[in-house]
Image (cartoon, rainbow, N blue to C red):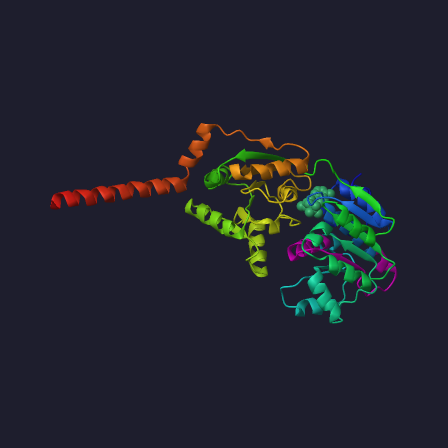
């Protein structure tokens, strides 16, 4: 079935076509009909499956239809997300699909001035995409009225729990009308998530996308055994042999992100970094620069692993393996999105082998091993610009040393 066969308004169809969405992905195919019918949905789907549009399309269609026949100047839908990056990204999808329709959306999140957000709320919006903190703030100030919400969406609900938003979600329930449609999206499901989900939805349609193999079929992923101290040489080599590719490199800590960036700088490779030390505006600038492809390599910590849709990432490099096995799926899910193909390579040192085992258990299957011949391994290290620069330095120091020694001998 193609999107052109769905009963959507012509502007929505036009917008989908402009986005290059011809036919629905699995999650869209399964979610759109029950959402249009007004049913609650509990969906287990990873990012990269097209889940944002799975709820955005039917929500926009419904609100657009409603606004044709009645005056509805109140907020009808709230989409809760765990991070401001995700809020911006989800909002972008809504805005693109809602272009030229009667539907207005607004994104609200903390860390920035409230004034503009308040002004937009006063002008009137239909859909609000929000992180919990700012949402409560504005609600307490009386500028955000949630009492007539018809649809509640919880996106990345598992991540909401991870970052401690469970109380916020529970508090929010008190302000929302009891009679509403609830759409609950989570990448994983465990007892805690189930409990939360069933406290929010009623008679929900349950949808689960590829539970057995959590890594998208579009992603070819493999692991290479590389010692900790040699990783930077391999990264340098991969970047240099794939100069036209957009690459997302994951590291364990923010200090390491900066260190790897410095190592690449020494090898004349331009990179961007993204971690929790960057303030909101910096993060937006970095993402924008990367999206536009001005700089092709982004080195990030796990703050980026979930939810963020960076278009056209060709490769993901796990420079360090993630401590949480589940994050492996989120990280490699940054590539091979929608209908595109992607590649992911993980560097695994001796110290990280136990982590790799954990990941494989989580995936229910081993990760393909990239066999590195010994010569290849040695060649990568010795042909690195950084090593060569070090070698040059060593040669120079040797010359200086010999010169000093000959001077001493002459004196004698
Ligand atoms: P999401 O899982 O919502 O983060 O979406 C992942 C990616 O899939 C995004 O880059 C979307 O633009 C893309 N996408 C979503 N739906 C479709 C579709 N029906 N056809 C092609 N690409 C899609």
**Percent coordinates x, y for residue 233 in the rendering:** 45, 39
Residue in front for this viewpoint, 33 or 362: 362
Does the magenta run of residues contain 69?
yes
Residue 280: x %, y % from top left: 59, 60
Whether residue 24 can be seen here = no
Number of numbered markers:
0
**Quadrant hosting residue 48:** top right
Using the image, determine if residue 242 lies above or below residue 67. above
Quadrant occupied by the N terminus: top right
- The segment highlighted magenta reads 65-94
Residue under the point 82% across and 53% down: 199
Q: Is residue 282 left or right of residue 138?
A: left
The residue lying toward the viewer, choosing from 113 and 408, is 408
State the image quarter where residue 340 is shown.
Answer: top right
181 shown above or below 220: below
Residue 365: percent from left, percent from top: 66, 32
For the C terminus, the quadrant is top left
Q: Is residue 211 magenta?
A: no
């Amino acid at each position: 079935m193609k999107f052109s066969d769905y009963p959507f308004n012509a502007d929505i169809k036009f917008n989908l076509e402009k986005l290059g969405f011809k036919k629905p992905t699995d999650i869209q195919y399964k979610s759109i009909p029950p959402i249009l019918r007004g049913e609650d949905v509990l969906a287990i789907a990873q990012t990269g499956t097209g889940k944002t549009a799975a709820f955005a399309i039917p929500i926009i269609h419904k609100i657009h239809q409603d606004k044709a026949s009645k005056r509805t100047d109140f907020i009808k839908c709230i989409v809760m997300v765990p991070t401001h990056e995700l809020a911006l990204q989800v909002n972008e999808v809504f805005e693109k699909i809602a272009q030229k329709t009667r539907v207005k959306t607004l994104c609200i999140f903390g860390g920035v001035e409230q004034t503009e957000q308040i002004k937009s709320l006063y002008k009137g919006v239909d859909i609000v995409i929000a992180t919990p903190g700012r949402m409560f703030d504005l609600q307490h100030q009386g500028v955000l009225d949630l009492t007539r919400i018809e649809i509640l969406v919880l996106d990345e609900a598992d991540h909401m729990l991870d970052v401690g938003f469970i109380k916020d979600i529970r508090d929010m329930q008190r302000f929302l009308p009891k009679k509403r449609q609830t759409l609950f999206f989570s990448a994983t499901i465990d007892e805690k998530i189930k409990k939360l989900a069933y406290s929010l939805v009623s008679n929900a349609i349950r949808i689960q996308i590829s539970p057995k193999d959590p890594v998208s079929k579009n992603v070819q992923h493999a692991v290479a055994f590389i010692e900790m101290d040699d990783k930077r040489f391999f990264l340098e080599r991969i970047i240099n042999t794939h100069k036209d590719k957009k690459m997302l490199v994951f590291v364990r800590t923010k200090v390491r992100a900066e260190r790897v960036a410095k190592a690449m700088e020494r090898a004349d490779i331009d990179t961007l970094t993204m971690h929790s030390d960057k303030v909101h505006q910096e993060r937006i600038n970095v993402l924008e620069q990367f999206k536009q492809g001005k700089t092709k390599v982004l080195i990030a910590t796990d703050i980026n692993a979930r939810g963020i849709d960076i278009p056209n990432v060709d490769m993901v490099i796990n420079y360090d393996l993630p401590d949480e096995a589940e994050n492996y799926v989120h990280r490699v899910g940054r590539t091979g999105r929608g209908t595109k193909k992607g590649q992911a390579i993980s560097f695994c040192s001796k110290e990280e082998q136990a982590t790799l085992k954990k990941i494989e258990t989580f995936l229910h299957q081993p990760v393909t091993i990239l066999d590195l011949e010994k010569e290849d391994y040695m060649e990568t290290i010795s042909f690195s610009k950084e090593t060569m620069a070090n070698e040059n330095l060593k040669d120079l120091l040797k010359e200086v040393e010999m010169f000093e020694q000959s001077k001493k001998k002459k004196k004698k």
